[in-house]
Amino acid sequence: MKTFESIAADMRSHKIMLPEPKIKIAIPDAEAVLQAGLNYFLSQEGREMKWLPEYAHIAGWLTDNKGRGLFLFGNCGRGKSLLCRYVLPAILLGYCQRVVSVFDTNEMNSRIDYVLTRHIICIDDVGTEEVSNVYGNRRQAFAEVIDAAEKQNKLLIVSTNLTVGEVRKRYGDRVLDRIKSTTQRVLFEGESLRG
């Protein structure tokens, strides 16, 4: 009887697509690393870091992501964009030698074909984008990114101010189900920290 390792090797030799391996993140002492990253980037803005309960969940993800991405959602002004755009990409580069391609939703829309070529994708402020129109074709860029995350094992880091209900209403049950299957979700609650 053939082994599936040999069958997979045959598939590769015939250029038959196989799933990419999931990206594993495992950073020792992740809470201290996350705190240092937050301190650094907030100090660049002249602000002090305040440890939030949500950060413990992110430190847990950094300790062992189980091959899943990260979906940060909830109230405005709680540090989701700072984490997505700066802190997490810096940590993944510095501690895992992984490059994170960071996009806001306008960039995601205008460069969707390029975004889909990246393997670790960060999208900040999902829910603020319009429907993408590429060469006359209307595209749901975020739905395409979520679909690629599931089918091609891309690692996603996403931030949004939308609630779960608003995500469902805007993108549908299929996208919400794929968010749940491909990411660890962290809810940000409480008052804005913006002064």
Image: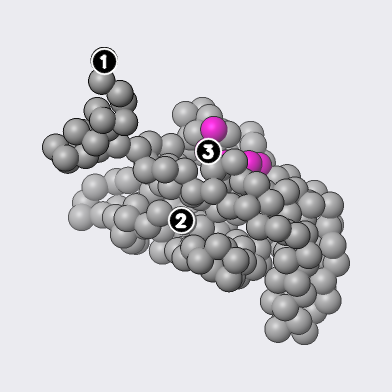
Q: Quick one: SS at disc 1?
A: loop
* Amino acid type indicated by mark 3: Thr
| Residue 112 visible in the current orientation | no
Q: Residue at x 61, y 63 (%)?
A: 88
Magenta-highlighted residues? 181-185
Query: In the shown orientation, is residue 116 left or right of residue 56?
Result: left
Characterize the local packing of mark 3: few (<14), some (14-19) or many (20 or more) Cα atoms within 10 angstroms: many
Q: Residue at x 37, y 43 (%)?
A: 20
User: Which tag is nearer the camera, tag 1 or tag 3?
Assistant: 1
Q: Quick one: SS at disc 2?
A: strand
Q: Residue at x 63, y 53 (%)?
A: 26
Read off the residue under disc 3: 182
Cα–Cα gap, marks 3 and 2: 13 Å
Read off the residue under disc 1: 1
Read off the residue under disc 2: 120
74 up-or-down from 6: above or below: below
* Amino acid type indicated by mark 2: Ile
Residue 176 at x, y percent in the picture: 54, 33
